[in-house]
Image (cartoon, grey):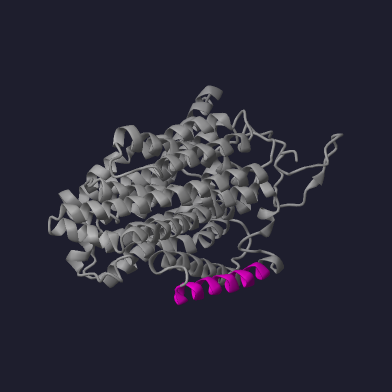
Amino acid sequence: MSAASPDQSQASAGRRLGLSLLVIATAQLMLVLDDSIANIALPSIQADLDVSAASLPWVINAYVLVFGALLLFGGRLGDLFGRRRVLRTGLAVFVAASLLGGLAPNTGLLIAARALQGLGAALAAPNALALIATTFPTGKPRNSAMAAYGAMSAVGIVAGVLLGGALTGLLDWRWVFFINIPIGLAVLAGTAVLAEGGRGRGRLDTPGAVTGTGAMVALVYGITRAGEHGWTDPFTLAAFAAAVLLLTVFLALQARTAEPLLPLGLFADRNRAGSYATILFIGAGLMGSFYLLALFLQQVLQFGALETGVASLPFAAGIILASGISSKLVERLTPRVVAAPGLLLAAGGMLWLSTLTVDSSYVAHIMPALFLTSFGLGLAFVPLTLTAVHRVAEDRAGVASALVNTAQQIGAALGLAVLTTVSTTAADEQRPGAAQVLQQGLAVDDPGAVARAGEALAQGYTTGFLTGAGLLLAAAILVAATVATRGTQRAADPADVADETRPRRRSRLAGEQFTTASGNRR
């Protein structure tokens, strides 16, 4: 039997990378989709299961809380026991939890199923991203893979609204959970094409896992509760105090242990640390702007659920287009040169949205502003994610990727809480309880009450957009100040295998003070 020719081997490797990307991108799509797919079904869930007003938000919050809290733990498990193995475990848990949620006969079991979905997502998400960093070579293959991964974040949010509206309206709310089963099983079967990755010889840092997870639970809970009950609520403040205490203990443990859950050396390079911080702002802008716009369309312009999903498609289009463009730009330009203008564009789009009124045209005003916002966010996401995971040692790729997901998830929760609080406060200043007044006006067919409430809500949402524009402007400044690497994401030099988590070495080149282990001059 003759050996395969170089061309055949290259074609086979290309096909394998293509299939790997399809599996990873579909997994990311499914996980992000569940951030928003249940939102549209909440009224139906409440009516069918007789869910109390206090319990209803936890159908969403249980997923967000567990997902965000366990990401570091899931990333470290992948480093130690194999990324494909942990990804498969996470997908299996997610599929089983989706079945449980779809069959749930009561509120308690549904919320427990959502928490279990969050556990599955926390195991799967960081290892999917880590497999991009360890499977795809630096340069065009990895840039394209990261662009697809980033695009799935926006597509998942929009697809969640579209699917949630269609499945709830045409079938039943339970199908927003059942839809995950065929997708999850297909992705699970497709993981056969993925390389294992990980499987280090270290041990799990149990004290670090307990304190780190506890800190994340307290932080995400505090942020979520603040959005519902205010930032001065006693339980909100207690949650933040617990988060600070547990985080302090966690960092002290990480500094002293030989095999930490979170190697603090990941933050030693300001480029990586700046990328993580900025991704938090991107998560806030991504989820916050989409959430406020969905409410504006439904409450102020009186769009239906499915119509709102269709009207949100430019949001996904902007992310997809910008991700593809930025994956090309990072081969020629430094991360800061791509990301900072992107964030300025996104801030401009949010500023444009802040000028909306009850009479604004969707085609002439909302659609272009929405596209500009999402295009700018997509332009920034790819270079910052690449910078965050670039040249991380093989046995730390899972944790580095988990930090990207953690920043996104905490940013999303923070963006929702902050922008919702701002918009609600501004609306109530115009007309107290504006949302309730709107619902009552619609129920009794009172056009005057509906119009007055709509104006107050429009004022609230536009104030939220203005706040979001300020956050994204701050993010652009943060990128300009911290992500100073002059390296690009071209194909890697095979000899350059050092890791930024290790001590820096002095440069032998005249005129340079030192070079980071990623090869980026400082």
In percent of the image, x 69 and y 33: which residue is there?
493
Q: Residue 431, how many percent across, how many down?
A: 31, 60
In percent of the image, x 24 and y 66: which residue is there?
104
Specify the quadrant that holds the C terminus: top right
Q: Residue 137, how many percent across, how many down?
A: 58, 36
Asked if residue 21 can be seen in this view, the reply is no
Residue 494 located within the stretch drawn in magenta: no
Q: How many marks?
A: 0
In this picture, residue 134 sits left or right of residue 482? left
Identify the magenta region: 233-253
Vertical arrangement, residue 320 with respect to residue 173, above or below: above
Q: Residue 21, how many percent across, how many down?
A: 45, 39
- Nearer to the camera, 394 or 6: 394
In percent of the image, x 58 and y 39: which residue is there?
340
Vertical arrangement, residue 504 with respect to residue 374, above or below: below
- Nearer to the camera, 444 or 486: 444
Residue 49: quarter of image = bottom left
Identify the main secondary structure in magenta.
helix
Asked if residue 221 can be seen in this view, the reply is yes
